[in-house]
Each structure stands twice: as C-alpha cells, then as structure tokens.
Amino acid sequence: MFWEVLLKGDNIDLLTAPVAALIVSWFSHFLLGRWAQSENQSVRACLASAFRPPLLLLPWLLCFFYLAHWFVDHSEEEGHDWLATSETVSSVLLPLWLLLRLIRQLPKIAEISGVQDKDLDLARTLSRFFHIVLIVLAVMILAQKLGYSLSALLTFGGVGGLIVGMAAREWLANFFGGLMLMLDKPFKEGDWIRSPDRQIEGHVEHIGWRLTQIRNFDRRPVFVPNSVFTSIVLENPSRMRNRRVVENFGIRYEDLDKIPAVMNEITTEFLQHPELDCSEPHYARFLKYGDSSLECQVRVHVIPKGRVDFVRVQESVMLIIASAVQKAGAEFAYPVMKVIHKANPEPESGNSPDTDTH
C-alpha cells in the first residue's frame, strides 16, 4: 500500500520522525503564509486558508503511522488489520477534507473576483452540490477499499433508499425544495420577501438544503421548511425597479378655477425631484366631483426601494402637494354639511297660538 511504502525506512530513528514532522509542518505554514501575502492577496488568502489545516496535519499523520509500524506487532493479525484499515480510511478522508475546504471557498473567491449576483448564486449552488457529490463518492471509494462489494451496496441502496425515502418524505421534500430554490432563484440571501398566503415577511439570512432562515421586522428569526416555497405565492420586493405612491386629496369647490395651476405645479415639481422615477407613468389629475370636495389624485414612482428611504421620499411628495395647493391660493377641503333653515309661516289672524280657546 501507499502508506506502507512511504513509511518504511529502517534508517530513520524513532526520535527523528516527530522532529521531521515538526519541521515539515512549520515549513508548510511558512510557505503558505508567504504565498498568501503575494499578489492577488485576497484569492490566495482564501486558498491558503483551505490548504493550511490538511497540509499541517499530513506530516503528523505520517509520523503517527510510522511510529505505529514500530510498536504494532505485525505477526498479530488483529493489530495489523487495525493499522491497515486506519491507513485506508486516512488515505480517503484527508483528500476529501482538502477538496471540501477548497469547494467551501468557491463562493468567497467568486465574491472577491467581483462577479455578478447571478454568478455568485451559481457559485453557492455549485459549492453545495459538489459537497454532496464528493461525500457520496468518498463513501463509495472507502467501501470498495475496505472490501465491500459496490454492486451489493448499490442493490441494497436501491431497496434501502425506497424504505428511507418513505420514512423521510418531509426531509426529501425540503431537500428538493431547497434545490429548486437554488436553481430557480426566486430570491437570494439578503432579499426582502413576503407571502400573501402565509405570514412570512422579512429578509432572507440563509438558504439551506432543508430550511430557509428569515429575519422578520421584529428582528426575530423565522425558519421556513423549503417545501413550503413550492406551494405558496411569493413576492420579492427587493427586485422592484421602484415603488409607487398613489395619494388622493380634495380641494374646495370654491377653488375650481385654481385646479389647473395646482396640477401643473405638482407635475413640474415631480420632474425636478431627483428621487422620483418620472420615466414611469405619473400624473396629477382632477378625478371627480365629491360630496364636499373636488377629488384629485397623484401617482408617481419612487426610486429608493427600502422602507425607510421610501417613506422619506413619500413625505416629500406629500409636501409638494401641500406647497402646490398653497402656492395656487387654494385650500384643502374637509367634510361640510350645509343645513338650510326655512322661515316659520305667519300664524293666521284669530288663531294666535297664544289664544286659549274653549
């Protein structure tokens, strides 16, 4: 085996093995540190952080197996088998650990490289997918190295998979729901989402294979099974191009002749406002005659999509309306009820109400 060929050497003393492991480990740490600090530091730092633990562990692992060969009696079958099994497992798990650490750095490297959000989501999805593929592949390789029949494992896996699938339907539904979220991308981490079907609203903090973590506006974490998203209507306000403001207000009937000036002033102010998107349909119009007012309406789209900034710009829209009404010399209407009193008729002569008749 590879480990036996590498570790055998009668010319190496027992005391030199730990010293050699220490020197190699320190030298690897030194080289990785220097390499991470060279050009393109961010990407190399990610790769160095992935390589460092496995490479630092490797010389000590070799030292352990070398010393084990000295102390284990190879004439005893039990001790020899234990050592051979440990070497086989290590020869599979150590490369697997290194590859998993490299794949885990893939989204971070993509983010440092300045890729678009769409490509960054793809990097996260590929990272999670390759995690599963590598683990399954490592289990199959390890089983074959330990002497198990791969065909028997696959046959048992087919029957056992059916049994496990029936027992874990919810888990599988959540798993494939998470896979669909990563492929269809209705939202990504950091988006603000809400559902009119369920009481779900907040910012997405993490999309897992089984659960999606959402932080609602009360700052409480909400954990939603991924299978829920396959059967509900979901809104993603974070992907809005802008937000709309529609406001109704009333002007007095006495100011009917001033309405054109009010509407023109509002439209002019909208066009000059830097945070209003006037490329979208917008208007300021007199709509209809109300019971006690001339009913008007304005519609305009706000560029900031965040709640705080939207409310701030909405306030400025309200102030523009008030300023236009005041500038035109008009006034806002309020509910008015007009009561008409009729004069009391004169009493007929001889029938004075003060006259008492018997």
Image: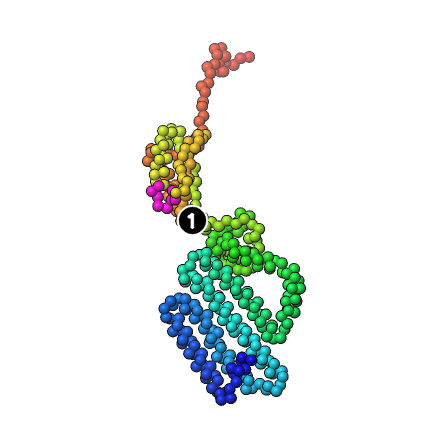
Left or right: 253 as drawn, with respect to 15:
left
User: Could you tell me which residue is drawn at 44 percent across and 69 percent down?
Assistant: 47
Location of residue 135 with respect to 118 vertically, above or below: below
User: Could you tell me which residue is drawn at 52 percent across and 83 percent down?
Assistant: 7
Q: Work out whether residue 212 or residue 336 is closer to the camera in this orientation and state it.
A: 212
Left or right: 57 as drawn, with respect to 36:
right
Q: Work out whether residue 239 or residue 346 is closer to the camera in this orientation and state it.
A: 239
Across and down, in percent, residue 318 comes to 39, 41
Q: Quadrant of residue 78?
A: bottom right
Q: Is residue 276 magenta?
A: yes
Q: Quadrant of the C terminus?
A: top right
Across and down, in percent, residue 138 comes to 56, 70
Looking at the rendered structure, the kind of residue marked 1 is Lys
Q: Which residue is mark 1?
A: 305
Q: Is residue 94 magenta?
A: no
Q: Work out whether residue 218 or residue 340 is closer to the camera in this orientation and state it.
A: 218
Location of residue 357 with respect to 299 vertically, above or below: above
User: Could you tell me which residue is drawn at 40 percent across and 47 percent down?
Assistant: 303
Per the rendered image, the range of residues in magenta is: 271-278
Q: Main secondary structure of the magenta part?
A: loop
Q: Quadrant of the N terminus?
A: bottom right
Across and down, in percent, residue 158 comes to 65, 64
The answer to whether any part of residue 203 appears in the image is no
Q: Quadrant of residue 83?
A: bottom right
